[in-house]
Image (cartoon, coloured by chain):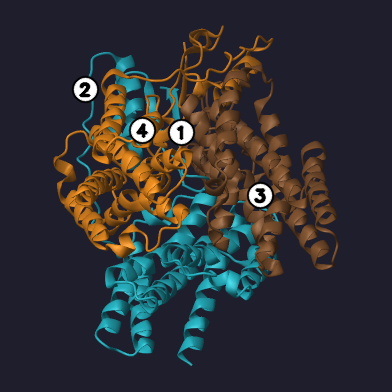
Chain colours: A brown, B orange, C cyan
Amino acid sequence: MFQSGIAFLDWLGIVAFAVTGALAASRNEMDLVGFVLLGTVTGIGGGTLRDLLLDIHPILWIEHPAYLAVCVGVSIGIFFVAHLIDSRYRLILWLDAVGLALFAAVGAERAISSHAPFIVAVTMGVITACFGGIIRDVLGQQRSIIFSREIYVTAALAAAAIFVVMAALGAPREVALVAGFAAGFGLRAGALVRGWSLPRYRARPAQLPSHTSRTNERSEYIEAALTDGFRRGPLPWEAAFLPGKFAEWTVAPSEPSIGASALAILSCERI
Amino acid sequence: MFQSGIAFLDWLGIVAFAVTGALAASRNEMDLVGFVLLGTVTGIGGGTLRDLLLDIHPILWIEHPAYLAVCVGVSIGIFFVAHLIDSRYRLILWLDAVGLALFAAVGAERAISSHAPFIVAVTMGVITACFGGIIRDVLGQQRSIIFSREIYVTAALAAAAIFVVMAALGAPREVALVAGFAAGFGLRAGALVRGWSLPRYRARPAQLPSHTSRTNERSEYIEAALTDGFRRGPLPWEAAFLPGKFAEWTVAPSEPSIGASALAILSCERI
Amino acid sequence: MFQSGIAFLDWLGIVAFAVTGALAASRNEMDLVGFVLLGTVTGIGGGTLRDLLLDIHPILWIEHPAYLAVCVGVSIGIFFVAHLIDSRYRLILWLDAVGLALFAAVGAERAISSHAPFIVAVTMGVITACFGGIIRDVLGQQRSIIFSREIYVTAALAAAAIFVVMAALGAPREVALVAGFAAGFGLRAGALVRGWSLPRYRARPAQLPSHTSRTNERSEYIEAALTDGFRRGPLPWEAAFLPGKFAEWTVAPSEPSIGASALAILSCERI
């Protein structure tokens, strides 16, 4: 009974992640096989890494190939319906949130079942939860979700930690799993809806150059944009009105969709 | 006899992939040790992952270090002759095709030898075939070959599936291997020569903004370029003739050579 | 006694790498959990891969969770003091150098202890030393340190090879370890201080186009910049003075900080 409950959650998490992988493939306009590749890797990537690290063989999907079949089926389905989905990116984020919380709790459970120490169990929960998405983003060349400004890895950590603590305190596993899932999903949902975040490390502000010649100013601003601007937002507004030539000057940090590229467009015109 | 045949194909595939890795190093202008690193990882990466997943130990190149030595030797050789090769990128693609079809069939064979279910065997063929190249592209920071517009993963899938089906139907393994290789290489060759491809997922066309002020139009076009344009080709031509200031406006999506960067150059000038 | 010496070096290497991972997180302005993630992955990534490949289970940090705890503690510490460090990038490089030389020697030692052949032991040294940093750069979306213009992988190779050769010749392991570390760190230090490097593969110079119309010239230069310019430095200076329209034309290859993005800014103006 309990095992089948765990298995159900595993299925749910795998489906959720497979959908996010397939949607990432749709953002890259891949073909059907590309959808299957990215969907499958995302669905089973985290659990595979966990099983490898814990030396659990055969690995989940080698023992139960139905997991593979589900990932393939889900990915094919998404290939045909993705255009119906209005905002794929939002959907990726929400399904990712479900998978994240599920896998964190289930991953920690599996580690404890194989007698790993508590800190290792928490780590395995985080690995199971996060590495499917990390592999998806690396292969799909998206900006990695671990850079998400809002709480992400933290939610996985909370889910895994709460499960482990409750299990250690003797709570029934079902209760611990539900509590872990609820905590992780709640945190991530708060992050998505309300923008919850932990304080981020802040670098000291860039020191703006003060120079002599106009040409210098310009090229140094360009350089500053290249080295500093992209992580600190647009160039200071006064850069747009350097005396002389440039009436307008916009620096737009890119939407990080294709690869991790920071992309600047510097458009200039004469007054 | 059969074993030595398999071993020979393994060698051939490893050499082909090692060459592609070393050529990728040459495109990055790395030093000799960089060539060896990238060549070796590409040559043995896919097989290593397969052996890890199937829990086959010692893995290939630990049991037979000669595989390592061959990768090292091939990479060193390429360091000295790469400049003689006229079109490295084409050569990478063709050798990659040979390795792809070989590894897909051989990888599936090894999985069946270790009693994996059929769907797992096909998966292992695809993993063996594709992950050397995937690791090469991730480490070499090239646009991943899985995004290839032409058939790629599909060829590996075909090679592995045909091998597995024929082996399941009782065909001699030699025959099944040759058939699998022929199918995979044939498909990929057709992709390289004739541009064969599967239909790709197509997003809905970008909706072009229709706004009021010129400045808005311009910045919104920039934004559209950043979010949509790069995966849908250049901006619509009419953008080049916005009323007023901009006589010419080209957006060139980048050659994806260094990293996965989308690179836009927006050059503007007054009429 | 010897074992505890090895363990101490392992600790030192893990701390050094964990610090580099956490500093990379600070460059990405991540939150506390992001620091822990990146610091931990960097600290134990190389050793984890080595243990997986050699089939040593339980892997290091599952057997001794204290390694995990140290990575977590170090990463948290860096979160609070990183702003005190004047040049994080330099510090990353130097700590990375310490970890590199340590892990190369220790990794080779562990492989020999599990009876791997010599070439495999050297490979394991290089893997242990380099893959923590490689994973850090892939996850942190920095330009991979394996592209470092100065000696890097070579230093790991030297450390591992010298250890293996000395051990094979019957030198006491302590001596071999110290010699390997000294060689690797010395080489890398020379690279950092004096710019030591191996000769790099050099592509033939880009052939500059010679065309007819002005517009063509311009777009072809842009294309040349996209395909060739970024790996060969700025465009030729004469491009800045194409007859006619363009008085100034600068191409600035990017600082590779965010992702592997090559970033060009092409600013043009009329004379």
Please name the amino acid that badge 1 sits on: Ile
| Host chain of mark 4 | B
- Give the left or right position of residue B35, taking residue A225 as reference: left
Query: Is the residue marked by circle 4 packed among few (<14), some (14-19), or many (20+) residues within 10 Å?
Result: few
Q: What's the distance in space between the residues labelled 2 and 4, CA to CA?
A: 61 Å
Query: Is the residue marked by circle 2 packed among few (<14), some (14-19), or many (20+) residues within 10 Å?
Result: few
Same subunit: marks 3 and 2: no
- For label 1, the residue is C265
Res. C234 visible in picture: no
- For label 3, the residue is A129
Which SS class for mark 4?
loop
Please name the amino acid that badge 3 sits on: Ala
- For label 2, the residue is C210
- For label 4, the residue is B169
Rendering coords of residue B245 (x, y %)? 54, 12
Between tags 1 and 4, which lies in front?
4
